[in-house]
Amino acid sequence: MSTTSTNKALARVLKSPGGHWVGDGFPVRSLFNYMEHAQELSPFLLLDYGGPAEFPPTDERLGVGPHPHRGFETVTIVFAGEVEHRDSSGAGGRIGPGDVQWMTAGRGVVHEEFHGRDFAKRGGAFEMAQLWVNLPRKDKLTTPRYQEIQGAQIGSVARSGARVRVIAGELDGVRGPALTFSPLNVWDIRVERAGPLELPSPSGHTAALVVLAGELQVGGAKVNEAQVARFERGGDGVRVEASAGAHLLFLGGEPLDEPVVGRGPFVMNTESEIWQAIADFQAGRMGRLD
Ligand code: MN
């Protein structure tokens, strides 16, 4: 079945440094971040895995209030619960299980991120991931864009014992709905039967498997929950053994291989662009939320 001829070797396993809270709504583990991993995982900058956690019913707004971003995209994938977003470009929405919000900060937005109001009142299981995708230098100051992608728009593919939802990129002729600025693949994978899982990834591309639940065996190495298997760029696919019930994200793409200088919510190419971002935000040039 597979057309893979040379598998990418495992480069290393990234281990989660432990958890922290984003605002009062998002208990996350940062599985990688741009301070340490921007070059090896280019074009991906950061992944926060939120939950799984149980929230009691509340009338409070749980989450994080207005804050800016510039120079990249935030991709929020909800697995359980609801996330509400509102930004200074006028975009906003509420997404639930299976849905994805792909927000291009570009030249700058101010946004807020909260639990959905109805979900907060009900309470219950909450689980999500937020991925930061870098923009090529030429697109860092692009016009902000908000793509709300409903779960029903996301096609899926059966591979060995797994179901692969194609959020971005293409697999076995199924194209993901997300528009991206560089060639990349973001796939949400549920493993039903334990066994080998093979995925294509062009030679030269970054490739990583994020383990949200369950475990992988790659060569002789074991990759546990909240860890990331990062592969070498050479070779045209990855092959792992996945446990039954494993929940994975595959991240692949053409590396940008440009300088990454980041500070908090801004990720640019140079130090002076960071100072410009801070000045623009402070002067209100990224807009405001009323
Ligand atoms: Mn944000």
Image (cartoon, rainbow, N blue to C red):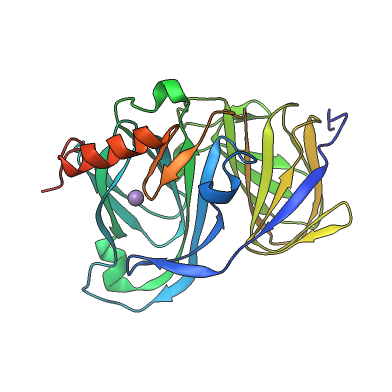
Q: x, y percentage for residue 254?
A: 62, 27
Q: Is 267 on the left or on the right of 116, as rendered?
A: right
Which residue is rendered at x = 52% and y = 46% of the image? 34
Q: Is residue 35 above or below residue 122?
A: above
**In the depicted view, which residue is nearer to us: 40 or 110?**
40
In the orientation shown, which residue stands out farthest toward the front? 272
Answer with the quarter of the image where residue 80 lies: bottom left
Examine the rendered structure and indicate whether residue 116 appears above or below residue 265: below
Q: Is residue 114 above or below residue 255?
A: below
Whether residue 13 is visible, yes or no, is yes
Percent across and percent down for residue 182 are 52, 25
Q: Nearer the viewer, residue 226 or 85?
A: 226
Q: Give the x, y percent position of residue 127.
A: 47, 63
Residue 44 locus on image (x, y percent): 55, 40
Q: Residue at x 80, y 46 (%)?
A: 10
Residue found at the very far top of the displayed protein:
138
Tag count: 0
Residue 147 is at least partly visible in this image = no
Name the residue: 77% across, 38% down: 232
Q: Nearer the viewer, residue 251 or 37?
A: 37
Furthest residue in direction left, as rendered: 290
- Screen quadrant of the N terminus: top right
* Residue at image location 26% in from the left, 72% down from the top: 121
